[in-house]
Image (spheres, helix red, strand yellow):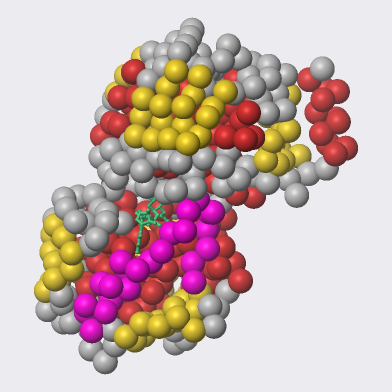
Amino acid sequence: MEQYIIKGGNTLAGEVEIGGAKNAALAILAAANMTNETVHIDNLPDVRDINALLEAMEGIGAHIERIDRHTVTVNGSGVENFIVESESMKKIRASYYLLGALLGKYKKAQVPLPGGCNIGSRPIDQHLKGFKAMGAVTKVEHGFIIAEAKTLHGAHIFLDMVSVGATINIMMAAAMAEGNTTIENAAKEPHVVDVANFLNSMGASIKGAGTDVIRIRGVKSLHKTEYSIIPDQIEAGTFMFAAAVTGGDIVLHNVIPKHLEATSAKLLELGCTVHEYDDAIRVIGPKKLLATHVKTMPYPGFPTDMQPQIAVSLALADGTSIVTESIFENRFRYVDELARMGASVKVEGNIAVISGVEKFTGARVSAPDLRAGAALVIAGLAAEGITIVDDIYYIERGYENLDKKLKALGAVIEKVASEKEIQKFQLKVG
Ligand code: UD1
């Protein structure tokens, strides 16, 4: 088991390169199996979730070549097994994207019920509703979701709630269905648009991605493409809050500032200075953060994946803030950990009332999920003394070299794997 050990109190300053969007990459890799030709994908983040999906794709017969750390080619012509049977797949929620991709191309798929972060019950009824409307039969047996169709046809699908996963999954299946599909109340997240652009570059006909009505004309086959994945708005946002809590000055490169508007707007309310450039953004933290209120919403609202990071920042702000989580019901599990560092947060259902404190003090805490884990690291950067974050396995699902990138900005942080290494660090930093 590895940990991050952090000596807080340093002001972070400098430049950081943001990687490709994990959540876009997961869907794009799954969709790459929908052609028999070789697809070239770059700006891929080298994180656990991505590597687990690549492994599972090889397990069903796809040929993957790793050109370099952030570039792969995928050739799905060898896919002949539609049963995705990989232990690692159970751990990542996006295993369900193989359902839409394989159903679209081969009209059948069997995928383990999704796992991923424990941040709520996370049903996939809307995905299945879409597949059924297109003529598929779906069932759950022995821990697998099985979807099959004699022919997959276009349909008019109205999603009951805005779901990123359902929108993308239905879009993939519909790309190779017979006829036209309309998805209403579709998710508008940047990665929905990225997956649509990717499919279109393979010859699909998808219009309206980025609005709440997406229209797809099914095509018979898809072809090769070369594609670069969009930057990760959540990784970027995490560094923006790291600048905020440390009174730092960080320039982030390889970002799309438009995708970060909700985050930037909140940082301004917190008292930060934010400068936007074409593909870079600079955040300067204030001497003292200001309290504000925030409610998570589907894009373009404030992302639920940034909720723990802003909450950590508000816990150090001057005054009382209210954070409302409206997407997932179980996303305040980090609050008890943060309390160990001196934060004052009261959770009532999906609302957290945060009374800002003067400072955090370092403590041993454990990452309850991916984004909350990153938020605890941010808390450690701002804390007085030493913080140890356990269970960083979660953090590494979605952040590439978080420790190294923070170190380059002036943080005192190490990845350690034993009590001995922890003691060594403590001796070193005093
Ligand atoms: C994706 C992201 C995740 C992010 C979330 C919201 C990936 C791999 N994960 O998750 O990081 O936090 O979007 O931006 O891209 N729902 C249902 N039935 C369904 C589908 C969803 O009830 O069939 C509910 C969910 O429980 C949740 C809400 O709809 O309350 C939104 O979920 P959704 O957008 O689908 O999230 P994911 O795609 O799972």
Q: Choose top left, top right, bottom left or bottom right for residue 197.
A: bottom left
Question: Farthest residue toward the front?
Answer: 348
Instruction: Give ligand 1's quarter of the image.
Output: bottom left
Q: Is residue 127 magenta?
A: yes
Question: Farthest residue toward the bottom?
Answer: 150
Question: Which quarter of the figure is the C terminus placed in?
Answer: top right
Q: Position of residue 142 (x, y in %)?
A: 54, 83
* Residue drawn at 41 percent across, 64 percent down: 123
* Residue drawn at 60 percent across, 20 percent down: 382
Of residues 199 and 347, the one nearer the viewer is: 347
* Residue drawn at 49 percent across, 71 percent down: 113
Q: Is 430 located above or below residue 147 in the figure?
A: above
Q: Is residue 221 magenta?
A: no
- Observer able to see residue 165: yes
Q: Position of residue 407 (x, y in %)?
A: 62, 28
Q: Which residues are magenta?
A: 113-135
Q: Position of residue 428 (x, y in %)?
A: 82, 22
* Residue drawn at 86 percent across, 23 percent down: 427
- Left or right position of 70 against 35: right
Of residues 149 and 63, the one nearer the viewer is: 149
Of residues 158 and 398, the one nearer the viewer is: 158
Of residues 398 and 363, the one nearer the viewer is: 363
- Left or right position of 414 against 69: right
Q: Is 45 located above or below residue 409 in the figure?
A: below
- Left or right position of 184 against 346: left
Q: Position of residue 166 (x, y in %)?
A: 31, 63
* Magenta: main secondary structure: loop
